[in-house]
Amino acid sequence: MNKAKTIGWIGTGVMGGAMCGHLLAAGHTVSVFSRTREKATDLVQKGATWCASPAAVAAQSGIVFTMVGTPAEVRQVYFSADGIFDGLNKASTMVDMSTTAPSLSLEIAETASQSGSYAVDAPVSGGDIGARDATLSIMAGGKESVVNEVRPLLDCMGKSITYMGPAGSGQHAKLCNQLVVAGTMIGVCEALLYASKAGLDCNQLIAAIRPGAAGCWTLDNLAPRIIKGDDAPGFMVNHFLKDLGIAVQEARALQLDLPGLKLAHKLYLETQKIGHGQSGTQALIHALNEL
Amino acid sequence: MNKAKTIGWIGTGVMGGAMCGHLLAAGHTVSVFSRTREKATDLVQKGATWCASPAAVAAQSGIVFTMVGTPAEVRQVYFSADGIFDGLNKASTMVDMSTTAPSLSLEIAETASQSGSYAVDAPVSGGDIGARDATLSIMAGGKESVVNEVRPLLDCMGKSITYMGPAGSGQHAKLCNQLVVAGTMIGVCEALLYASKAGLDCNQLIAAIRPGAAGCWTLDNLAPRIIKGDDAPGFMVNHFLKDLGIAVQEARALQLDLPGLKLAHKLYLETQKIGHGQSGTQALIHALNEL
């Protein structure tokens, strides 16, 4: 078996499962591991090989993708006993598509380099739907030649792959993405709250302001859900809060005071606290409504 | 002269001058007044008739448009001696296109009604360029039949005219517009600040995040100016701050706590204080940079 051409995939949740599915559909040989084995059943039926640990996946593969949850989970998958580094072949490439701390991506890249391997951080934007439809935006950090090597695989999962710079840069870009998302979400929720108190028809309001300077993805995609009272997650509050928490820490490390980020972090903690951790990010409106 | 068909225009600044010009270009008879007479010279050369006061304009007109600055200036133009109400013909219509307090629009509408006339509040979004190119978004409040009567005239100035409800509703909608703009601006500025501290290429960042959930008018139109260090106003900090101040007061009157709005108001006061009152709204980045 030419291990350089086989792919490992770790983390088969809603997003990871869909993304790995695109690689299988493109004809790649894939080994998988997931904390919850049942979540990989569908992929195994489609031809993936189940492995008992991240180390076992790494031992089978030339390129290992990870799509897990929190930075703590990323750390465990890479560094624990039975973790990726425990089974890794020389000259392998790891691609972490989770949103995690840039400093952790750097640590993975440095450890990889010490063992003659390579690491890329390639977090994504676009949510469940983007993963399912292979329309993700992917922001990649690492050695440019290595990113170019895995680009054909990333192309199976996303519609836009942007090289952002050295290890950690993909994560930095993703955090910037979340800063903009946080700002637009606060603006849109406050506008809808104001509008409904002032007696405006919120749908008319959207129609009136969307062609101008207020135009944004959140107004087009989430404001209609808010008006309908639909809290279903495109992207979950718990996950967004994880990203905002990472951004707060990184901003502090960069000695940056970002009051909008701090406000968003505080408001989303509140949103989680009132029982909307598993709602979509648009549930921010409920926290604002209770102020 | 059939006064019902002649138009009065008060306020011929950069925006008002361009908007009034479109009415002249469409063949309408227009009387004008402006606090600074020189600012009306161009319109007079194009066929407008100069009047010595708002009252004189009103006496010549069946429909009076106003496009002035602050709520205090709007109040003066309507209610002072020599103001519009001093010269108004019976059954006239007034259309205030300034962004002002919804409560002031209501007061104008009530006064109009007492004297057998009508008032519409029709603030705009789209800035200097929208005024020049007649592509403004116009949000109208007042009696719907009266708004429909003036709609052909509004069509000369804007590409989208939305009826929002009774008097004051146009102003409420405009304030909602500004709430969204404030949120997106904070998000975009904080993202660019973070990106540059983290060593990312800001142009690549925009390319990477604009197709997704971070996509917004501000990212497309103002982020490139921020990167170039271009503070030139599309919309001036001083004017935005006026709007945010009105929004803060109105939110208080509606018993709404809007922390994003309060933050934006505070940050723009800071932007003004460090000498950027006449810069474009993107100059917020300088205030954030000094935190």
Image (cartoon, coloured by chain):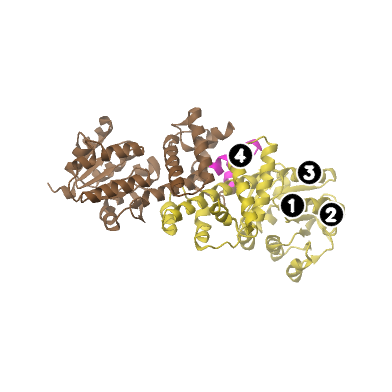
Chain colours: A brown, B yellow
Helix, strand or loop for the magenta stretch, by majority: helix
- Kind of residue at disc 4: Leu
Q: Could you say which is closer to the camera, residue A94 or residue B78?
A: A94
Q: Earlier in the sequence, mark 2 or mark 1?
A: 2
In the displayed structure, does residue B261 sit left or right of residue B87?
left
Residue B30 x %, y %: 77, 62
Q: Residue at x 46, y 51 (%)?
A: B194
What numbered label is drawn on residue B107? 3
* Cα separation between marks 3 and 4: 25 Å
Q: Are marks 3 and 1 in contact (CB under 8 Å)?
A: no
* Cα separation between marks 1 and 4: 30 Å
Q: Nearer the viewer, mark 1 or mark 4?
A: 4
Residue A202 within the segment the image draws in magenta: yes
Q: Earlier in the sequence, mark 4 or mark 2?
A: 2
Chain bearing mark 4: B
- Kind of residue at disc 3: Glu
Number of residues whose C-alpha sits closer than 10 Å to that of mark 2, classed few (under 14), some (14–19) or many (20 or more) = many
Q: Residue at x 21, y 49 (%)?
A: A115
- Kind of residue at disc 2: Gly
Chain bearing mark 1: B
Q: Are marks 3 and 4 in contact (CB under 8 Å)?
A: no
Residue topped by disc 4: B258
Q: Could you say which is closer to the camera, residue B287 or residue A8?
A: B287
Q: Nearer the viewer, mark 2 or mark 1?
A: 2
Q: Nearer the viewer, mark 3 or mark 1?
A: 3
Question: Do tags 1 and 4 sit on the same chain?
Answer: yes
Range of magenta residues: A186-207
Residue B129 within the segment the image draws in magenta: no
